[in-house]
Amino acid sequence: MSEQASALITGVTGQDGSFLAELLLEKGYAVTGLVRRGEPDLGRSEHLRGRLELLEGELLEPQTLRDAISRVRPRELYHLAAPSFVPASWEHPSETLAAIAGACAAVLESVAAVDPGIRVFHPASAMIFGDAGESPQSECTPCRPQSPYAVAKLAAHELVGVLREHRGLHASSAILYNHESERRPEQFVTRRISRAAAAISLGLQDELSLGSLDAVRDWSFAGDVMEGAWLMLQQEHGDDYVLASGVGHTVADFAQAAFACVGLEADRYVRVDEELKREPEPTPSIGDASKARAGLGWRPRVGFAELVARMVSADVERLSP
């Protein structure tokens, strides 16, 4: 890069935002994070305080968003801010649609108004496929979303494609499968498992209650996925890509791997709570990232076993006296 590239990140305080900010800083970018008014906590990016410029803004208040984009004039805009906990969308579907589809629309509209040359990244979700009837899923798989969250993600994903085609925006949407790390919030099942394995090994907990142990997920490392996001915006034109490992594992597999990291057998400590179980999923959620591998040269670097070990090790360190 002959001159310093700049990037604006919404959602910089979250898991993905923290890994992306680290990556961009390592590549010499000037990185600005958009944070809500009166929100001093940088969350998962707290360790980057002083290396990031911070601007206050609200995604559903278009003028504050436009002001931030006008001030930064970034080469790249990564729109990561959105709800990520699917069950909550059933309680507040209107809020979910506004926070995901509405905010995506506001970002794209602001870019078009301020500088259509800004490259935009949007994270869609494998949840858009729902009961697709085929596994693994690719960019061409039919979408049959089965939750308000998935409907909102699909609406935003389609909007990116429509505005890319009709307004010529360099906008890309990544269809992301489950991506984890030690920075994942504890309400997600992977962190519940890794933390429980650590706590039980330290004598701080007796057992772990889980729901459906046979649910299949395609788990990747969040840092690898954010590298894919960066690669998408280095292409000549925007496009849509599945970013996934291509390998499915059950929740039971994750638990067994996590407890093995601390020398324990998961079967002795994991209990199935019928109240936590969900309806069986007819289509295994596994992604086909062939397009990203061929077009971006993207490859996940952290495998399943290493990912689980990384998470458990971090939780052991957190909980140790």
Image: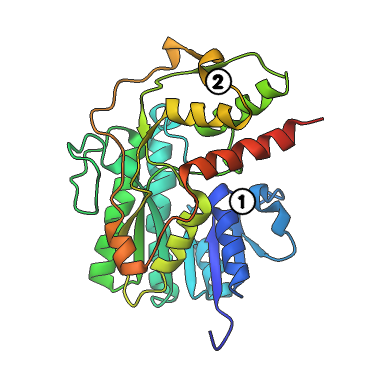
Q: Residue at x 68, y 23 (%)?
A: 201
Q: Nearer the viewer, residue 260 or 51?
A: 260
- Identify which amino acid the numbered label 1 is placed on: Thr
SS under mark 1: loop
Q: Residue at x 30, y 68 (%)?
A: 295
**Percent position of residue 112, x then y:** 38, 71
SS under mark 2: loop
Residue 210, above or below 240: above
Residue 277, above or below 38: above
- The residue labelled by disc 1 is 13
Q: Residue furthest top?
A: 274
Cα distance between the residues tagged 2 and 1: 35 Å
Q: Residue at x 55, y 89 (%)?
A: 2
- The residue labelled by disc 2 is 265
- Identify which amino acid the numbered label 2 is placed on: Glu
Q: Earlier in the sequence, mark 2 or mark 1?
A: 1
Q: Residue furthest front?
A: 263
